[in-house]
Amino acid sequence: MAKTAQLILDGKTYELPIVEGTENEVGIDIGELLEKTGAITLDLGYKNTGATKSAITFLDGDKGILRYRGYSIEDLAAKSSFLEVAYLLIFGDLPKKDQLSTFTNDIKTHTLVHEDIKKILDGFPSTSHPMGVLASLFCAQTAFYPEALDPNRSGEGVYLSIVRSLAKMPTFAAWAYKNAVGHPVNYPDNSLDYCSRFLKMLYALPAEQFEVDPVVADALDKLLILHADHEQNCSTSTVRIVGSSKASIYSSISAGINALWGPLHGGANQEVILMLEQIKKDGGDTEKWINKAKDKNSGFRLMGFGHRVYKNFDPRAKIIKKAADDVLKKLGVNDPVLEIAIKLEEVALRDPYFIERKLYPNVDFYSGIIYRALGIPVDMFTVMFAIGRLPGWIAQWKEMRENKEPIGRPRQIYVGQKLRPYVEMSKR
Ligand code: MLT
């Protein structure tokens, strides 16, 4: 017999269907709640609300498990490449050799952006944060490829938009940075792999013979894999809800980039480094700042510790910590800010206050450190996250469309004024 949950409202019992996922997660289906009972649910921040049924990413926050399409994040980070993971997320299975090679070549074909994009870029002052520029350039693709506005676009058309998105993202990202530093932009070098191509566009100076360090490119590839999807987080939910209005893939993802920008989401990695710099400037006494973090009245919050859904540890953080150690060693990086990070991590991991509250370093803590070691400028940290998250946004947008999900339209409990008569200006 199908399982149900019972809801008693005003003495009347309602049977609500139960939905079970492949990993035995249980959801109470309230799809007909309003119609049947006249009531809605209230769940600020949607922390108890499943917004969709998805086959892309499985996450168990209690056990610290993260899987893309059934493959563990540990295996993918150790054995796969970013474009292979992108293919997996978007199309559902690991690619065969020829499939990956076609996908990679299709992406290479579209790395160049329209020259008029440069005119848009020129309109941004160098004070513009690269995330704002990235979101704008990404959305500007709707002007260059208006066919993507067709809400019924499918098959080859959607594939082309996906390939264009993955191909042009690193170009937009590097150009957003060049704009911030006032340097001329670099064009994509298609003889290079995805990460090396981006790094060359980011760093190379005019007429410079620029060689990408393979240690840096490999570390970046791993970081992008670790960020590629994270089920219904703030930016992904944004992409799905914007896409549910049948807005184009470019505008939906541009909205996701804006959602990611906030310091409580993707912007957290930038906040981590700013915090470490603040501690260094103050003399580097980590105990003092740990005590401040414990004092509710200090207004100071330890950035990059704890996570909304992981109650044990962030599995990505474990992998990234090891990667950070390897990269720091290989590159021979000696940076006082990184030393503060290591001290802070040590103190927090043995302090009962942090242990009891499950405030362990999360992915943003280590990604900030590793990006700094790789020489990525601080304002670009969240942009790096966006490059990594792109396949996840695409996969979730595609799934939402293929499932023919209805337009997202939450309800509310109104707590404002009741009807009152209009008061003339002279009488207010
Ligand atoms: C993410 O990867 O999106 C972040 O860890 C935030 C989240 O999942 O809520």
Image: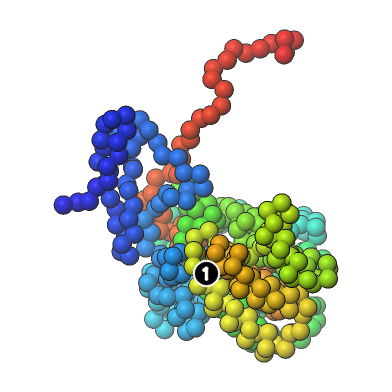
- Locate residue 42 relative to residue 201 in the image: left or right: left
Q: Where's residue 250, x and y in %?
A: 55, 56
In this picture, is 217 found above or below 107?
below
Front residue of 379 and 343? 343
Q: Which part of the image, by quadrant, shows the C terminus?
A: top right
Where on the picture, by quarter, is residue 374? bottom right
**Mark 1 neighbour class, 10 Å CA radius: few under 14, some 14 to 19, many 20 or more:** many
Q: Where's residue 204, x and y in %?
A: 75, 78
- Locate residue 140 relative to residue 313 in the image: left or right: right
Residue drawn at x 79%, y 65% as measured from the top left: 278
Could one spot residue 204 in this view of the protein? no
Question: Looking at numbered disc 1 in the image, what kind of residue is underneath it?
Answer: Asp
The residue identified by callout 1 is 314
Where on the picture, by quarter, is residue 32? top left
Q: How is the image coloured?
A: rainbow
Q: Secondary structure at mark 1?
A: loop
Residue drawn at x 33%, y 37% as measured from the top left: 33
Q: Where's residue 223, x and y in %?
A: 58, 75
Q: How many marks do you count on the picture? A: 1
Q: Residue furthest left?
A: 1
Where on the picture, by quarter, is residue 339? bottom right
In this picture, is 291 found above or below 70?
above
Front residue of 74 and 52? 74
| Ligand 1 closer than 8 Å to label 1 CB | yes
Residue drawn at x 62%, y 70% as measured from the top left: 351
Could one spot residue 256 in this view of the protein? yes
Residue drawn at x 35%, y 34% as measured from the top left: 34
- Locate residue 371 relative to residue 283 in the image: left or right: left
- Locate residue 379 relative to residue 319 in the image: left or right: right
